[in-house]
């Protein structure tokens, strides 16, 4: 079938075909129900077919789909005002994806230095294990060889240092450095949490050296870690932040947020997007905020996260040959597997539970933020069954030599 498919064969897809979803559940064409703890890779932040999002999209679909940024767009001003009121930011640029939000963040930082009379300052320091998207600039920012190979010379202006190595970081700062770019929690890299003291050190380093701090909260943002944004746990604020994924709840939507100062170089004509900020996306994004910013919602995320965390730690103790470590924050959790992670992921899928792999042999659990404690316990039960099935397989193998 792969041979005959008219699609680019760039994805390694699981052999599952889903027809519809309800909250944390995905339902196949034949009616089988799967517990979805991948949630479109942290995209379906309110689960599948959330009634408030469905009606926001349908209502807008009856009015206007597309206008272009030649005119004011319904929802952009309100949405941006709500985002800036709830964050460090003063200004917002809307995009359709995470990589585009990062592109805008990178351009904003370079343009800031340029407008300050420093066109030579265009380098951005990034970190090993980072993931910032798949465009030519963002694969250079991510710096991972597997994504760079074969696509010509790596785009200039990205200098990578090991995560957590402050000496290497300081040594990498030169007269050509414009900014530091980091994910507060590396997602694709393996749910690697950047400790709060390092976040604060980064802030100080940027202040001392005239650099902008750019955060990639495409995966960690919009309630995922139990705060509106993950950097809030460390008490610092960035100058620029890229968001996407959860903010659209499944609608392709991203944004670049910045302080007035950081955005000062982005004057008329410096950036644009045909679809960025389109009325459908604005309607859905505003509806996501209605729910996520509701009193008690983030507390709910923290409460369910605690159930998951404690349950996972118990499973780690019970299955030390299968689970090596539990990491992450809020509902951005990682199981570092002792067995090849694909084996555990496969065993979980046999239990009709979905999750997603990451670097460092980690399985990511990124359930909808609306997941209940009861659904979390159901997930833990399925992970337990998966681990047990791997133990039984292992015993069989050792019995048969
Ligand atoms: C997914 C992701 C991106 C890229 O987002 P796309 O919408 O796929 O372009 C960038 N940064 C992080 C941290 C991500 O998780």
Image: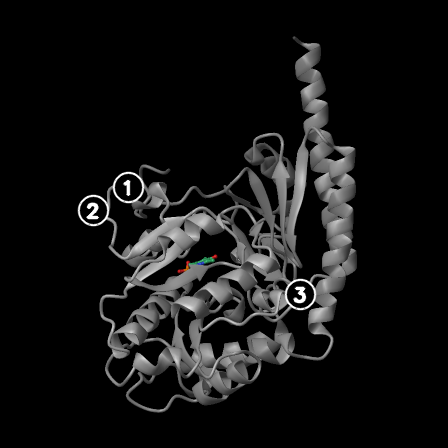
- The one of 379 and 195 positioned closer to us in this rendering: 195
Against 196, residue 33 (above or below) is above
Mark 2, residue position: 152
Label 1 residue near ligand 1, CB within 8 Å: no
Against 311, residue 91 (above or below) is below
Examine the rendering and report whether any part of residue 213 can be seen.
no
User: Residue 149 has which mark?
Assistant: 1
The outermost residue toward the bottom is 72
Against 281, residue 38 (above or below) is above
- The one of 247 and 144 positioned closer to us in this rendering: 144
- Quick one: SS at disc 3? loop
Taking the spot 56% from the left edge, 75% from the top edge, the residue there is 54
- Quadrant for ligand 1 reads bottom left
Examine the rendering and report whether any part of residue 153 can be seen.
yes
Q: Earlier in the sequence, mark 1 or mark 3?
A: 1
Inter-mark Cα distance, 2 to 3:
40 Å
User: Residue 226 has which mark?
Assistant: 3
Inter-mark Cα distance, 1 to 3:
36 Å
Taking the spot 50% from the left edge, 70% from the top edge, the residue there is 248
């Amino acid at each position: 079938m792969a041979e005959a498919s008219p699609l680019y064969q760039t994805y390694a897809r699981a052999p599952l075909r889903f027809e519809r979803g309800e909250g944390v559940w995905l339902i196949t064409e034949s009616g089988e129900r799967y517990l979805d703890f991948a949630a479109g890779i942290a995209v379906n932040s309110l689960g599948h077919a959330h009634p408030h999002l469905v009606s926001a999209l349908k209502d807008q679909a009856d009015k206007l789909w597309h206008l272009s940024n030649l005119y004011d767009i319904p929802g952009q001003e309100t949405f941006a005002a709500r985002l800036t009121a709830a964050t460090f930011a003063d200004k917002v640029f809307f995009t359709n994806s995470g990589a585009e939000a990062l592109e805008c963040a990178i351009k904003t930082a370079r343009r800031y230095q340029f407008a300050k009379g420093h066109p030579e300052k265009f380098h951005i320091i990034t970190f090993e294990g980072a993931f910032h998207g798949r465009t030519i600039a963002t694969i250079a920012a991510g710096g991972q060889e597997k994504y760079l190979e074969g696509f010509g010379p790596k785009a200039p202006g990205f200098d990578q240092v090991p995560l957590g190595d402050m000496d290497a970081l300081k040594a990498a700062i030169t007269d050509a450095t414009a900014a530091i770019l980091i994910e507060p929690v590396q997602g694709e890299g393996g749910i690697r949490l950047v400790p709060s003291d390092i976040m604060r050190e980064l802030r100080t380093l940027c202040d001392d050296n005239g650099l902008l701090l750019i955060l990639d909260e495409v995966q960690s943002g919009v309630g995922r870690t139990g705060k509106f944004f993950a950097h809030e746990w460390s008490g610092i604020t960035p100058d620029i932040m890229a968001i996407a994924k959860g903010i659209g709840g499944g609608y392709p939507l991203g944004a670049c947020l910045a302080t007035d100062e950081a955005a000062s170089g982005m004057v008329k004509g410096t950036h644009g997007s045909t679809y960025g900020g389109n009325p459908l996306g604005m309607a859905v994004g505003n509806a996501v905020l209605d729910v996520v910013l509701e009193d008690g919602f983030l507390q709910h995320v923290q409460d369910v996260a605690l159930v998951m965390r404690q349950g996972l730690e118990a499973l780690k103790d019970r299955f030390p040959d299968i689970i090596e470590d539990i990491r992450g924050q809020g509902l951005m959790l990682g199981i570092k597997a002792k067995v090849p992670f694909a084996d555990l992921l496969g065993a979980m899928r046999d239990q009709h539970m979905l999750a997603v792999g990451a670097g460092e042999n980690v399985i990511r659990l990124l359930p909808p933020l609306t997941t209940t404690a009861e659904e979390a316990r159901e997930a833990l039960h399925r992970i337990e069954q998966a681990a047990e099935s791997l133990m039984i397989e292992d015993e069989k193998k050792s019995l048969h030599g």
